[in-house]
């Protein structure tokens, strides 16, 4: 199977000779996770579309709600909403709240690794952290970046795939779903 994949990759690269393929490098700018800076004006314009406006209002309302009393899943979504509002409304207060919340949430984040589908909750926190890292990047201090990277690695080790991801079929198997191709990859792209 590896030989087939390698041969196929060589064909896609336009060479029949076996050549190592370089890993793609994320752009040197932020944002780069799901959206790029050149996309923001069009996205902001489309937020006013009649079909999109009520959805955007829900995101803004969620981001401006108070986080007290939220369970872990709800808090993870709140953090992501804060990061999105920071990005699309260029709202530094939302970004600062997301960063400060993660500064307290990440060190305390603990999961029952025997619970069913726990990788989904771990991955959701990883992805929300990646959103904050990427979309609030200008507001991050060196200490914030270091803290986020340390805890993203720690969380990735808790996933079923492990970190580095050596458990499971990374391309065609269960491991290649959200754990690797969304949560871990999203974290790496953001960083």
Image (spheres, rainbow, N blue to C red):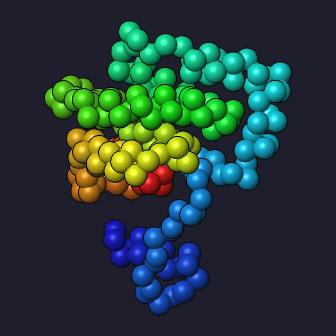
Q: Residue at x 42, y 31 (%)?
A: 100
In this orientation, which residue lies closer to the viewer: 137 or 161? 137
State whether residue 156 appears in this view.
no
Q: How many numbered marks does the figure carry?
A: 0
Task: Pick out the residue farthest to the bottom.
Answer: 17
- Point 34% across, 71% down: residue: 2
Q: Residue furthest left?
A: 114
Residue 157, x across and y down, in percent: 23, 46
Which quarter of the figure has residue 92? top right
Question: Picture coordinates of residue 189 (x, y %)?
Answer: 48, 55
Instruction: Tell me if residue 90 can be seen.
Output: yes
- Which residue is at the front of the view, 178 or 88? 88
**Dividing the image into 4 quarters, which one contains the N terminus?**
bottom left
Residue at the location (76% across, 36% down)?
44
Above/below status of 165 relative to 46: below
Query: In the figure, residue 3 lies in which quadrant?
Result: bottom left
Residue at far top of view: 69
Left or right of 81: which side holds 186? left
Q: Position of residue 108 (x, y in %)?
A: 24, 29
Residue under the point 38% across and 33% down:
102
Q: Is residue 55 left or right of residue 75?
A: right
Up/down of 29 relative to 136, above or below: below
Q: Decide which of 143, 131 is in the foreground and name it.
A: 143
Query: Where's residue 71, x and y in %?
Result: 36, 15
* Position of the C terminus by quadrant: bottom left
Q: Please tell me which residue lies in front, 94 or 159.
A: 94
């Amino acid at each position: 199977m590896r030989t087939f994949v390698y041969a196929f990759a060589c064909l896609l690269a336009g060479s029949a000779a076996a050549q190592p393929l370089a890993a793609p490098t994320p752009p040197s700018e932020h944002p780069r996770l799901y959206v790029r800076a050149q996309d923001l004006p069009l996205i902001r314009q489309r937020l006013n579309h009649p079909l999109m406006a009520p959805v955007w209002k829900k995101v803004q309302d969620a981001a401006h709600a108070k986080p007290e009393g939220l369970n872990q899943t709800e808090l993870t979504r709140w953090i992501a909403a804060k990061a999105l509002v920071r990005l699309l409304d260029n709202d530094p207060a939302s970004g600062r709240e997301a960063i400060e919340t993660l500064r307290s949430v990440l060190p305390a984040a603990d999961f029952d690794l025997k619970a069913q589908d726990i990788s989904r909750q771990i991955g959701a926190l990883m992805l929300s952290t990646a959103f904050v890292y990427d979309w609030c990047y200008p507001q991050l201090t060196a200490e914030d970046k270091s803290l986020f990277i340390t805890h993203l690695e720690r969380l990735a080790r808790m996933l079923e795939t492990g970190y580095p991801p050596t458990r499971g079929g990374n391309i065609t198997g269960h491991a290649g779903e959200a754990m690797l191709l969304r949560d871990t990859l999203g974290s790496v792209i953001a960083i």
